[in-house]
Every structure is written in C-alpha cells, then in structure tokens.
Image (cartoon, grey):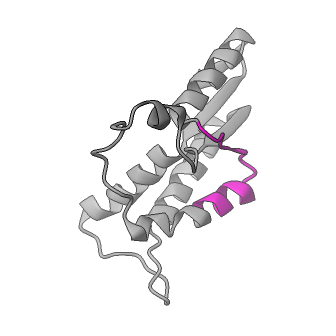
Amino acid sequence: MRAPRLFLIDSFGFIFRAYHARSRSGAPPMRTSTGLSTEAVYIFHNMLRKLLAEQKPEYIAAIFESTGPTFREEAFAEYKANRSEMPVDLSEQIPYVRRILEALRVPILEYTGFEADDVIGTLSRRALDSGVDVVI
C-alpha cells in the first residue's frame, strides 16, 4: 500500500511560472474590464486544478513567503539585494490567487520571519518522519 502524500506548493514559484508562461507565449494580455491583469490567476488556477485532479493528494498546503523581513534578511543586509521588485500587475493578482486557494480549501501557510523554502523544508522533514511521502 502506498504511503499518503503531502503536496507542498511553493506559491510564489507557481505564481511566477503562471505569470511568465503567458508573457512567453506571445498571447495578448488577459485583463478584466477595469484593466486588472488576470493571466497569473487564470493559469495558476488551471495548474492547481490539474494537480488536484491528476494527483489526488491526501494532504496539500500552499506556502507563501513571509510578508515581513526574514531572519536571513536581518542577518545579511545584502541577501536578495539584487532581486528586482515584483511587477505591479503581478502583485495585484496575489489576493485573487489566495481566494482561489481558499475556495478550493487548500490551506495557506505563511510564517513571519521565514521564507517559503524554510517552511517547506521543515514540513517535509516532519512529514517524512511521520511516514508521509512529500511532493514539492
């Protein structure tokens, strides 16, 4: 018998993949009648629905980056110093991605002071120690 599986979604990883997939395709931007970009929301939703339908995970969670500074940023002033800001048209879509996760009853995890990678690593170790397979 197969062990239960925990799927841990690096939410911003999924969101960035969705956002850039549309721009690379050369297709015209998807926008609401008020001008709000919706590409990332639409593609994220499709990716998530496909994952749920095909993989049928026993457990799943969406992990988000901390909204405040992380312990690494506090320890190393240059940490992520060269990373550019998130495009405004993408940041405006994040609340809608969260709504999709809530509507599909996917738990959203976000811990102040920690990056998603740190949370995913900790949860993975705990799940594996409990006999649960992990898919990231």
* Res. 124 image quadrant: top right
Q: Which of 68 and 54 lies nearest the eye of the viewer?
A: 68
Extreme residue toward the bottom, this view: 33
Report whether residue 57 is seen. Answer: yes
Q: How many marks?
A: 0
Q: Above or below — where is 40 with respect to 121?
A: below
Question: Residue 43, position in %: x, y?
Answer: 47, 59
* Res. 56 image quadrant: top right
Would you say 95 lies left or right of 74 here? right
Residue 109 within the magenta-colored segment of the rendering: yes
Q: Which residue occupies 31% across, 47% down? A: 83
Would you say 79 lies left or right of 15 here? left
Question: Residue 66, position in %: x, y?
Answer: 58, 45
Q: Which residue occupies 67% across, 25% down? A: 5
Residue 31 within the magenta-colored segment of the rendering: no
* Res. 98 image quadrant: bottom right
Q: Which residue occupies 41% across, 76% down? A: 30
- Quadrant housing the N terminus: top right
Question: Residue 122, position in %: x, y?
Answer: 62, 22
- Specify the segment rendered in magenta: 97-113
Q: Above or below — where is 5 with respect to 62?
A: above
Q: Which of 93 and 43 lies nearest the eye of the viewer?
A: 93
Q: Above or below — where is 108 with respect to 3?
A: below
Q: Which of 90 and 19 lies nearest the eye of the viewer?
A: 90
Report whether residue 136 is seen. Answer: no
